[in-house]
């Protein structure tokens, strides 16, 4: 297995993650194992619950949804959906499911499973952080408050057809169905394991969980009955947790691991980046994330737009980028460059070297006052 170093050049301010560049299909051979290290243990592999960068990619290896993205892009493509139709007014989405999609327990996946999975995410008892993404589906308010058992806007037409009716047009709905929160789970397995389903995940993804030793490692094995022929290429992925990034880098250099999942340690970044032997091992990629400092607009003096503008203009973003060795780009808007809707021609608020104190006296605040940044 080829060794890889992750050096994130984020498509957002102050973020430092990365994606792996896909190799040419004809160059990839079937078989083999890959070892990935992480510092922290995995909290859950339940697609309705998991919402951090570490378990997000793991969950996508175990579960499928109606929609997905072309690897390394934000271009949508059907996954377990074979096709879909959208009504002229943009409020009705009808999906046809592929034949031959199976869960890891051997049962065929049906449209009823899709309905159950999304309603489970919306159900307040699940406590999913992603429930709000489905707010445009009819019946969301009643279902999310617990007043209804399901979403009135989801109809199972037959085993391979499902229809979504929205309360309003939603240009993001196909993207919502590509999120982990919309991935499909088998009801019988959820009911069997209850709150521990996240530790005993069963999906329809390219890999299935074969071992999980808490605090030590997880092992994913190739799912032989996966609906997409020839995928995955690997037979096994081993995730070793509890590995400090510096130790992971040393193990990579010794040929003991393949991918340090936490990336290049900041203290070693310049050294590794400038080392010729690592030239072909560093993979750069963007991240759908924007890092920011937030201001409580209900608290003085941040309730005044002029003060918020002054704070924004006083932050030296270029210096921050230098401190983190250029592993980000300065944000000029809430959306990162790789996110649909990003405006390339939008001009960011200029940075002023000398803090613009002139805003303070005009707002009845003494010059040189220092608002509490922790309130």
Image (cartoon, helix red, strand yellow):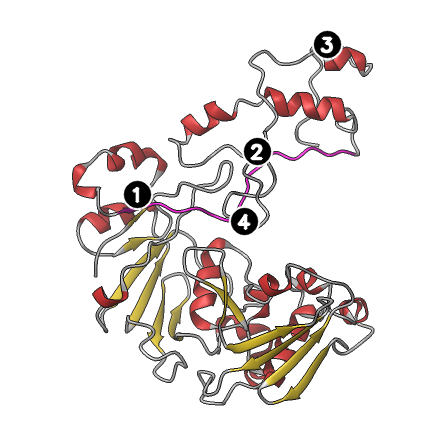
Residues at badges 4 and 3 in contact (C-beta under 8 Å)?
Answer: no
Front position among marks 3 and 1: 3
- In the picture of the structure, the residue carrying the numbered disc 2 is 332
Placement of the C terminus among the 4 image quadrants: top right
Seen in the picture, residue 263 relative to 178 is either above or below; the reply is above
Label 3 with label 2: CB-CB less than 8 Å: no
Q: Nearer the viewer, residue 148 or 309?
A: 309
Identify the main secondary structure in magenta: loop
Residue shown at the point (34%, 74%) measured from the top left = 231
Q: Is residue 14 left or right of residue 152?
A: left
Q: Residue at x 50, y 77 (%)?
A: 80
From the image, state whether disc 4 or disc 3 is nearer to you: 4
Q: Residues within 10 Å of mark 2 (few under 14, many from 20)?
A: some
Q: Position of residue 324 (x, y in %)?
A: 41, 31
Q: Earlier in the sequence, mark 3 or mark 1?
A: 1
Which comes before the other along the chain, label 4 or label 1? 1
Location of residue 98 in the rendering, given as x and y in whole percent from the top left corner = 49, 83
Distance CA(mark 2)–CA(mark 1): 33 Å
Q: Which residue is mark 4?
A: 339
- State the CA–CA distance, disc 4 to disc 3: 40 Å
Residue 134 image position (x, y, % from top left): 69, 65
User: Where is mark 3, residue-wise?
Assistant: 367
Front residue of 374 and 224: 224
Magenta region, residue range: 282-297
Residue 288 located within the stretch drawn in magenta: yes
Marks 3/2: CA distance? 28 Å
Q: Label 1: how many residues lie within 10 Å, few (<14), some (14-19) or many (20+)?
A: some
Locate the N terminus and report the quarter of the image it occupies. bottom left
Q: Earlier in the sequence, mark 3 or mark 2?
A: 2
């Amino acid at each position: 297995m080829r060794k890889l170093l992750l050096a994130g050049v984020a498509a957002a301010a102050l973020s430092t993650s990365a994606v792996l560049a896909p190799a040419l299909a004809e160059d990839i051979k079937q078989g083999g194992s890959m070892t990935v290290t992480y510092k922290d243990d995995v909290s859950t592999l339940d697609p309705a619950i998991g919402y951090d960068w570490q378990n997000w990619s793991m969950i996508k290896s175990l579960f499928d949804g109606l929609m997905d993205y072309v690897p390394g892009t934000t271009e949508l493509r059907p996954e377990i959906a074979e096709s879909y139709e959208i009504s002229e007014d943009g409020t009705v989405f009808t999906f046809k499911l592929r034949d031959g999609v199976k869960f890891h327990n051997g049962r065929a996946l049906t449209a009823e499973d899709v309905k159950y999975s999304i309603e489970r995410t919306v159900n307040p008892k699940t406590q999913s952080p992603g429930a709000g993404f489905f707010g445009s589906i009819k019946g969301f308010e009643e279902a999310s408050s617990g007043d209804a058992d399901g979403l009135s806007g989801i109809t199972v037409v037959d085993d391979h057809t499902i229809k979504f009716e929205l309360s309003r047009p939603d240009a993001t709905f196909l993207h919502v169905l590509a999120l982990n929160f919309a991935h499909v789970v088998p009801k019988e397995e959820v009911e069997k394991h209850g709150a521990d389903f996240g530790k005993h995940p069963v999906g329809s993804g390219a890999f299935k969980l074969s071992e999980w030793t808490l605090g030590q490692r997880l092992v994913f094995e190739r799912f032989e009955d996966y609906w997409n022929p020839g995928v995955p290429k690997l037979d096994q992925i081993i995730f070793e947790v509890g590995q400090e990034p510096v130790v992971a880098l040393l193990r990579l250099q010794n040929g003991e691991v393949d991918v340090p999942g936490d990336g290049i340690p900041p203290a070693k970044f310049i050294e590794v980046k400038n080392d010729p032997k690592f030239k072909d091992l560093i993979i750069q990629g963007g991240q759908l994330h924007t890092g920011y400092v937030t201001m409580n607009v209900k608290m003085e003096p941040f309730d005044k737009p002029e003060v918020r503008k002054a704070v924004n203009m006083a932050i030296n973003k270029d210096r921050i980028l230098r401190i983190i060795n250029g592993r980000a780009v300065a944000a000029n808007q809430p959306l990162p460059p790789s996110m649909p809707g990003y405006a390339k021609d939008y001009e960011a608020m200029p940075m002023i070297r000398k803090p613009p104190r002139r805003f303070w006296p005009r707002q009845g605040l003494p010059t040189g006052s220092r608002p509490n940044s922790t309130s």
